Image (cartoon, coloured by chain):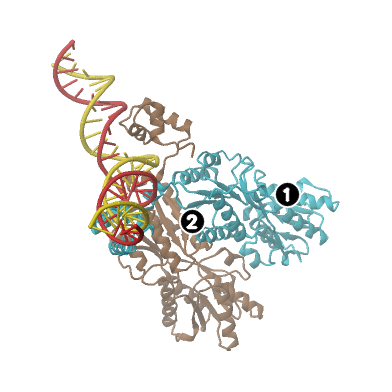
Chain colours: A cyan, B brown, C yellow, D red
Amino acid sequence: MSNKVTIHVIAKALNIDSSTVSRALNNSDRVTKKTKELVLKKAKELGYQRNSLASNLRKNKSYTIGVVVPRISRHFFSSAISGIEEMAYSLGYNVIICQSLEELSREESIINNLISNRVDGVLISVSMETEDGAHLKALKQNNVPLVFFDRHCNALLNTSKVSLDDAHAAYEATNYLIGKGNKRIVHFSGPQTLNIYRERLKGYIKALKENNIPFDEDLVLSSRLMELNGKELTKKIIDNNIVIDAIFSANDLAAIGAIKYLKSIGKKIPDEVSVIGFSNEPVSEVIEPSLTTINQFGLKMGKKACELLIRIINGEALKPHEKNEIIKPELILRESTL
Amino acid sequence: MSNKVTIHVIAKALNIDSSTVSRALNNSDRVTKKTKELVLKKAKELGYQRNSLASNLRKNKSYTIGVVVPRISRHFFSSAISGIEEMAYSLGYNVIICQSLEELSREESIINNLISNRVDGVLISVSMETEDGAHLKALKQNNVPLVFFDRHCNALLNTSKVSLDDAHAAYEATNYLIGKGNKRIVHFSGPQTLNIYRERLKGYIKALKENNIPFDEDLVLSSRLMELNGKELTKKIIDNNIVIDAIFSANDLAAIGAIKYLKSIGKKIPDEVSVIGFSNEPVSEVIEPSLTTINQFGLKMGKKACELLIRIINGEALKPHEKNEIIKPELILRESTL
DNA sequence: AAATTAAATACAATCGATTGTATTTAATTG
DNA sequence: CAATTAAATACAATCGATTGTATTTAATTT
């Protein structure tokens, strides 16, 4: 309370006007060099810290972007965030990180909060519960630019997005399994409301078709893709005596659950069952056998998404092909499919 | 630009004063129920979103706390953040998450930015480069309450903190190794500027002393504790023919580097070398052999730290013992020491 | 040195919401 | 029904910084 150092305090101390102080602090060329030095010196001396609330309110610009992800503990998201931060800071922007924890209600309140805080734009990878994205329309209404990355929202068609070529990734993975002689391939999928899981399923089906392997819908199992889901689904398959020779999971966690369960009942990986995951989480490299998986290039996606967003913020009109950026995935071969 | 819906717009639409609109939106009892309903309806109709910048500026309160951690991708930190968010949201606060990436310069600019944005308080676990914490004094100067968790800053003595009983954790771990018959125990330590690494070293030494095992300073190796450090340090030990029978690493990452290297040269774990890590990262459970490690209870630490901070924000004067909250660690026994 | 121009600074409105005080309206009481 | 009190609303200042316009001061030109 005692030391509320504002530009007015500095102004009074130097016997000049606060507008001059403001301009001096902003290095305006309407202020003489000498005055600038005086102001800067006094500001430092008094421990002045600009009040961004006031500044942003007046300028109607916060140089801040909001980032919403399901959870920061996922390697893909934390690396995407690193990419976002890198790009943002290099362009003079700050980043607010928020996690929805896969809950729609949290996502909604986060969005409202970001609007209230007048962020200049939002990057989002939606939760598993998100469907129509009504809450995202509030962003449009408030002229807050939005860019999706990884997980989209189908309802908002004209919104820019950066995505992985999920279908291709899944196609490659499945194809690879088939090439190794597997024919009864289980696919662990996620909520079909999310583009990424639909696309991965598509790629899986395409690969089967091209290789004349009949599609068996009993082999596609949807869940929230937690480790426990992977375990339980695998147990169910085994308990029901369903014959399988491979698992392609839409994420690493569920794949790891599967591996752990298979090992626990003495099934040999990859001899009896091959496994492929998705995302290249750090554990995928450490587990034994190490897990074949797909690199989503989170850093690159984050950077790209942030770059697009800031271009939109700056009033640039993106060309149609730029509004739909697609990152090429990479299949990382490891022991679980050798 | 078109739809700048402020309280004044609502006021004009209803032919009442903006102060009444403000009070209605804040559910003040100075406004009649009927007017409140009218205002709420109109606000919804026009898509009004409160401008927090203006509100916070006026109220000089943001209901936001800043959280600074080295990196969100570490399990301990992401779970601490979860705890912080849980507590914060339950008390009506928002959270801004920032990562220093272990760089002092980033930490400094983050702190300044948080002050500028007038957060009500800050929770921090400092970077490996942080020493005197001069940049944190700016928080004091600006009356922004601060609470440390996990990694402190020695210079700021009177600041509240929540920490693990690191010395005890290390003591227990080392003692356990000794109990298993190990006598030549390497300790991977981190920068000695950080309390956590000093404490862990202390606990290690204490255990040795109590068991009459001579302390050999050549067995204490400091690094940044990345996986690569663990690998290289282990290689160096082996290459120099230094006799060891166990490694106690101040984090899991370096321990995993050690395990990987030991396995690569055919050393049996734990038969030839036992290994203990620190933090209970998810990979520690998955690696083979699974890694004995220490649970830091990130969620609990985060919750506690946030609770303390908000109590300070609310003007409560903490009792001396509350200013130094200590969480009890837990040794998790796994295969790497069996 | 007077006149013109340019540079530096001061003045004042503004961003949007909040809040103490003043005023109007409605309710209560004798 | 007038007088008093209470309830509801309006007025106006404020938070701290920014910025267009006006004014002062300094520099340049003749």
Q: Which residue is mark 1?
A: A201
Quadrant containing the N terminus of chain A in the rendered view: bottom left
Compute the Cα span from label 2 to label 1.
Answer: 37 Å
**Up/down of A206 relative to B111, above or below:** above
Mark 2 burial class by Cα count in 10 Å: few <14, some 14-19, many 20+: some
Q: Which residue is mark 2?
A: A93
Viewer-nearest residue: B157 or A318: A318
Number of residue marks:
2
Q: Percent from the top left, x then y, of residue B116?
A: 38, 56
Which residue does the image show at 84% across and 52% down from the upper left?
A: A210
Residue type at tag 2: Tyr
The disc, 2 or 1, on the residue closer to the chain's N-terminal end is 2
Residue type at tag 1: Leu
Q: Percent from the top left, x then y, of residue B153?
A: 37, 69
Seen in the image, is A242 located left or right of residue B195?
A: right
Seen in the image, is A326 located left or right of residue B280?
A: right
Viewer-nearest residue: B333 or A282: A282
Which chain hosts label 1?
Answer: A
Seen in the image, is B153 located left or right of residue A237?
A: left
